[in-house]
Image (tube, rainbow, N blue to C red):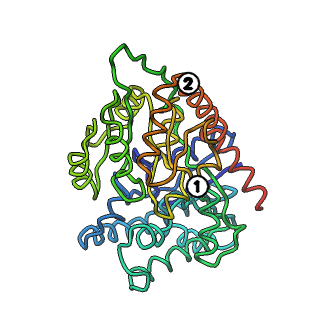
């Protein structure tokens, strides 16, 4: 079988989904040919989060070039069985359908909705505004142009089907996963007498992540030997630093960008890794990259309870789950792992097994092949 990976998809650090699916399909014995144009640059989400007029114009110019480049490249592409549109592929899937017609199946990787992220989650504009209507139209058009739309959780599949009035069968779950060659199991750090427990969070400071809950938990634990390291930047950084100073807590903020190698080193030094704790509806529908990263390395994960996280992990077995937005509950979960190292070891081991079963490129590639065959 030969698959054409098509589009302006990103291969940058921090966005493993395209690389994971490409690697997974190849491990499953599929020949993957690539038809790609560079458009988005290093940080895809900067455009979506801070869409200045200048940035939008520059991206539009690159998109025009990308459309022309992809059209020419696809005309020369070797024979293939179906087309996989990489993330972000909102425009690419429309171009692919125009070029291909109904001759081949098109599978779209779309783990976020532009409308849902910008309007539903971040409230960047009114739901009835022109930008909102344009984003909603683009999402719906992209989803309808594909034969199969890959979503990261069944919760997202249910939500998108209802939000855009599209047949639920079109949406197929494919976990985001992680590159198991970069994120490898590391021996848990051995804490000497008097050394603090090391708790790690990494990610962007946006409402979905609920980092204020982490700051609240650190304040609850400020008189215990527990240190928090928060790596990332974003719109809430200044307010979170101010909140931490006001409440107290052993919190260190690292705002410098970290490479994948550096991030793996941070995870390796941590005793516990944190997921997301936001109270937004979207936070209940995701299993974020950071959870897969920590599971891959073999660290116990504490994250918010949600229908999405329970699609892969079980409370008290492969992770500790706590209510969203509840700093005291998060503090208690961290304290449980602190006072019971054997529980921490069991959770870490079971979490890593869950990653091996569901989050490696091999597992994701094999499942994708099965899903595409079922939907054929």
- Residue nearest the observer in this picture, 288 or 339: 339
List x then y, in percent, for residue 1: 72, 48
Q: Residue at x 25, y 42 (%)?
A: 248
Instruction: Give the vertical position of 236 relative to 182 (above or below).
Output: below
Between the C-alphas of marks 2 and 1, the distance is 27 Å
| Residue 88 left/right relative to 200 | right
- Residue nearest the observer in this picture, 324 or 148: 324
Instruction: Give the vertical position of 256 relative to 345 (above or below).
Output: below
Q: Quadrant of residue 107?
A: bottom right
Mark number, residue 196: none
List x then y, in percent, for residue 286: 53, 55
Q: Residues within 10 Å of mark 2 (few under 14, many from 20)?
A: some
The residue furthest top is 193
Front disc: 2 or 1? 2
Q: Residue at x 46, y 73 (%)?
A: 115
Residue denoted by label 2: 345
Q: Earlier in the sequence, mark 2 or mark 1?
A: 1
- Residue nearest the observer in this picture, 90 or 77: 90
The local secondary structure at tag 1 comes to loop
Residue denoted by label 1: 152
């Amino acid at each position: 079988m030969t698959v054409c990976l098509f589009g302006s998809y990103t291969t940058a650090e921090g966005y493993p989904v395209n690389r994971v699916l490409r690697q997974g399909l190849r491990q499953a014995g599929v020949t993957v040919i690539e038809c790609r144009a560079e458009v988005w640059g290093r940080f895809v989400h900067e455009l979506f989060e801070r869409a200045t007029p200048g940035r939008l114009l520059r991206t539009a110019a690159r998109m025009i070039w990308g459309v022309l480049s992809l059209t020419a490249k696809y005309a020369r592409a070797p024979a293939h069985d179906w087309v996989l549109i990489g993330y972000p592929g909102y425009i690419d899937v429309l171009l692919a359908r125009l070029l291909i017609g109904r001759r081949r199946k098109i599978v779209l990787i779309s783990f976020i909705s532009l409308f849902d992220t910008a309007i539903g989650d971040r409230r960047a504009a009114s739901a009835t505004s022109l930008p909102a209507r344009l984003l909603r139209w683009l999402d719906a058009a992209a989803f309808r142009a594909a034969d199969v739309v890959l979503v990261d959780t069944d919760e997202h599949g249910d939500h998108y089907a209802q939000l855009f009035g599209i047949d639920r069968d079109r949406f197929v779950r494919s976990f985001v996963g992680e590159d198991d060659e970069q994120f490898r199991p590391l021996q848990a750090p051995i804490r000497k007498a008097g050394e603090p427990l090391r708790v790690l969070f990494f990610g962007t400071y946006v409402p979905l992540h609920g980092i204020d809950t982490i700051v609240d938990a650190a304040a609850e634990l400020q008189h215990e030997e527990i240190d928090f390291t928060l790596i990332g930047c974003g719109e809430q950084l200044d307010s979170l630093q101010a909140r931490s100073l006001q409440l107290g807590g052993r919190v260190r903020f690292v705002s410098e960008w970290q490479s994948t190698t550096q991030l793996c080193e941070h995870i390796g030094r941590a005793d516990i890794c944190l997921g997301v704790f936001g109270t937004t509806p979207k936070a209940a529908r995701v299993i974020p990259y950071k959870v897969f990263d920590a599971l891959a390395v073999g660290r116990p994960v504490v994250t918010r309870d949600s229908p999405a996280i329970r699609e892969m992990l079980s409370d008290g077995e492969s992770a500790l789950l706590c209510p969203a937005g509840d700093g005291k509950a998060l503090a208690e979960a961290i304290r449980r792992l602190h006072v019971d190292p054997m529980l921490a070891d069991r959770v870490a081991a079971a979490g890593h097994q869950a990653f091996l079963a569901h989050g490696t490129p091999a597992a994701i590639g094999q499942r994708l092949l099965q899903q595409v065959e079922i939907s054929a």
